[in-house]
Image (cartoon, helix red, strand yellow):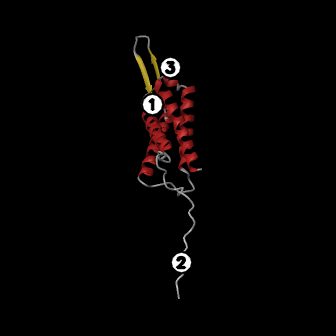
Amino acid sequence: MQTPEPTYPPDLGPDPLEPRHGSRAVVPGYWGERLAWVAGLVLAVSAFTDWYAGSQADGLTLAVTGWHTGALGKLVFFIGLATLILEALREAGIELPATVPESLVLIGFGSLATIFILIRLLSIPDTFFDTANRGIGIFISLVAAVALIIAGLLRAAEEL
């Protein structure tokens, strides 16, 4: 008795999962990850920059850091620190549960930080009224908080 000839599946063309030659491989999550790292670091450091600045009659210039503006300045620092811890845990291979998407956590952190900074931007504490001018640090914090929201949106776009 003769064994039948083996049949091979028809050739379907190149494997879509194999990288094509001549094209650059896109690393998924690159921009969202890097932006989250940078935004978290800048947000944490910007709490120690001048949020309010002003000069007195004798020519002395005063500056008040975000850390000294009360609870909101400290919360901005801790949001930046929590973002850095979240990113470090992700790099170490520890991920959040599937029911808690990391992109949503980043968007939440960025939204909270933006609200806290906008409150301090619009409402100067009474103890620092002599330094009624806003410093560059509060605007750097605001840009970092918005960048954290954008990093979360980039991560959400990658998950779709």
Depth-wise, is mark 1 or mark 2 nearer the camera? 2
CA–CA distance between discs 3 and 1? Answer: 15 Å
Query: Which-is-in-front pick, marks 3 and 2?
Result: 2
In the image, what residue occupies the spot 54% across and 29% down?
120
Up/down of 146 relative to 17, above or below: above
Q: Position of residue 12 (x, y in %)?
A: 57, 61
Query: Which numbered tag is attached to residue 68?
Result: 1
**Along the horizontal axis of the image, is 107 left or right of 135?**
right
Residue 132 percent location from the top left of the image:
51, 19
Disc nearer the start of the sequence (3/2): 2
Residue 32 % position (x, y): 50, 43
Please tell me how crowded label 3 is: few (under 14), some (14-19), or many (20+) other residues with Cα within 10 Å: some
Residue in the foreground of this view, choosing between 56 and 86: 86
Residue type marked 2 = Glu
Relative to 22, say whether 131 is above or below. Answer: above
Residue at point 46%, 30% (across, down): 66
- Dots 3, 2 in contact, CB < 8 A: no
Mark 1 burial class by Cα count in 10 Å: few <14, some 14-19, many 20+: some
The amino acid at mark 3 is: Asn
- Residue 157 seen by the camera: yes
Hey, what amino acid is under mark 1? His
Q: Which mark is residue 133?
A: 3
SS for callout 2: loop
Residue under pointer 2: 5
Which SS class for mark 3?
Answer: strand
At horizontal 49% and vertical 24% (from top left) the residue drawn is 127
Do tag 3 and tag 1 residues touch (Cβ < 8 Å)? no
Helix, strand or loop at label 1? It is helix
Q: Earlier in the sequence, mark 3 or mark 1?
A: 1
